[in-house]
Amino acid sequence: MATGLSPALTRITSAQRRTLLAASLGWMLDAFDAMLYALVLAHVMRDLGMTKGTAGLLNSLTLLASGIGGVAFGFLADRIGRKRALMLSILTYSVCSFASGLSRSVLTLAIFRFILGLGMGGEWNTGATLVAETWPMELRAKAISIVQSSWAIGYALAALVTGIVLHYANWRMAFFVGILPALVTVWIRRDVPESEMWERKRAERNQAGTGLHSSAHDRTANDAFIRIFQPPFVDHTFALFFMNFFGMFAWWGLFTWMPPYLSLPVEQGGRGFGVMGTTTLLVFLNLFGMFPGYAGFGWVADQLGRRKSFLLYTFMAGVLVPLYAQAREPWVLLVLGAVVAFFGTGFFSGSGIIGSEIFPTAVRARALGFTYNGARALSSVAPFVIGRVGQTKGLSWAFYLCGASFLLACLVATQLPETKGKQLE
């Protein structure tokens, strides 16, 4: 029996499928490289003599850089194209992941993780913008949710690879594996098309600006970007920015410290799982929690609307995180961890959906860069704060702050507009 989606699905072209695959692979491998640090953190702390506060600070630097990179790559994607910016971001984080394995001091590791963050931040908004501009309106939410869900696959793959590598080698080898995503850029360069919407807008700007110097074009583009801080966009810009900030503070605070939380000895505030036990829990959490949470948000958003879906996901995460912090039994950590991951990560799919629908093509990549990666830069304090609180009061207590931050994200989400069914401009 035919479904309501069948006509739309039959119109999907091979080029659209390739853009979806490219953005998904980029985000999946972004997660793979980004989360390697959290997965080997307990080993790095021991070998380089880092405290929890210092270890959290390094990840905070990565997140700060991701905010800078997101905004910078947003400008770059609006200028040179979504495809080229996507390739450059992947190359950046892949090379720096490999370089992290060469680090012999905390300082050199911090430098490599900072540069990695620049590429990490640039991938999300370039990939999400590419998909939003190439997929039809009735499938846009689901397509972007599929892109976002690939983060969970990358995280699970990183956990699996790290578990195997640490069994036979050390944490440096885990970082060396992080160079492999660079190979994807060869395929993107050859087979993935540029956004036709971006190319059309560029042609219109070039035609309208014939005879103007490039500096004049830059000023025009910058003037257009300022529009997101003016009516009618300004309220929505900052509502999305702060919803992302509180959600990211909670997510990075929780999931940066979850691997060491599970693997550290009980007397150090952890749960005392071995390498393979921690790997099993994290793989299950990603495949049965994060992945369906990310992928399912698009379907929920098409049924309930964008705003109500944000409210549902962030509220449930805020309620469940304190319960997870009190869990002791392995099966409870397994099941409840997956449910927390479902709600606590799934709502991120909505950021690309609603952001793409709020902002026009001329500034879409930059607007997503600001509202998503700018928020990620501001949330960069989370790993450091949670690490310091965990050092003094224990990680279980520190996770309560993450639950409170999810509830603040829910509160801010009440100020977002409903954009379901909106055509892109």
Image (cartoon, rainbow, N blue to C red):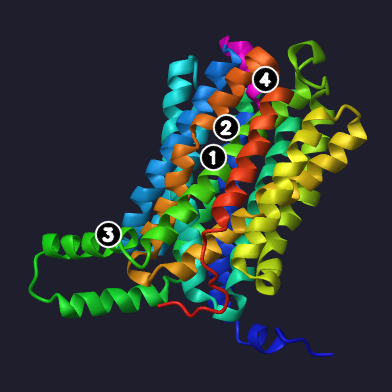
Which mark is drawn over residue 176? 2
* Residue 345: mark: none
Kind of residue at badge 2 = Phe
In the image, residue 348 lies at what x, y percent? 60, 54
Secondary structure mostly seen in the magenta stretch: helix
Question: Would you say the residues marked 1 and 2 are in contact, meaning their CB atoms lie under 8 Å apart?
Answer: yes
Q: Which is nearer the N-term, disc 1 or disc 3?
A: 1
Question: What number is the disc on residue 179?
Answer: 1
Decide which of 240, 357 is in the foreground and name it.
Answer: 240
Horizontal side, residue 201 vs residue 258: left or right: left
Decide: is 78 above or below 56.
Answer: below
Mark in front: 1 vs 3: 3
Residue 224, position as x, y percentages in the image: 26, 65
Marks 4/3: CA–CA distance: 43 Å
- Residue at disc 1, secondary structure: loop
Q: Which mark is residue 42?
A: 4
Q: Is residue 140 left or right of residue 119?
A: right
**In this rendering, the label closer to the viewer, 2 or 3:** 3
**Disc 3 designates what residue?**
226
Which amino acid lies under the numbered mark 3 shown in the image of this protein?
Ile
Residues drawn in magenta:
40-49
Q: At label 1, which amino acid type do we have?
A: Ile
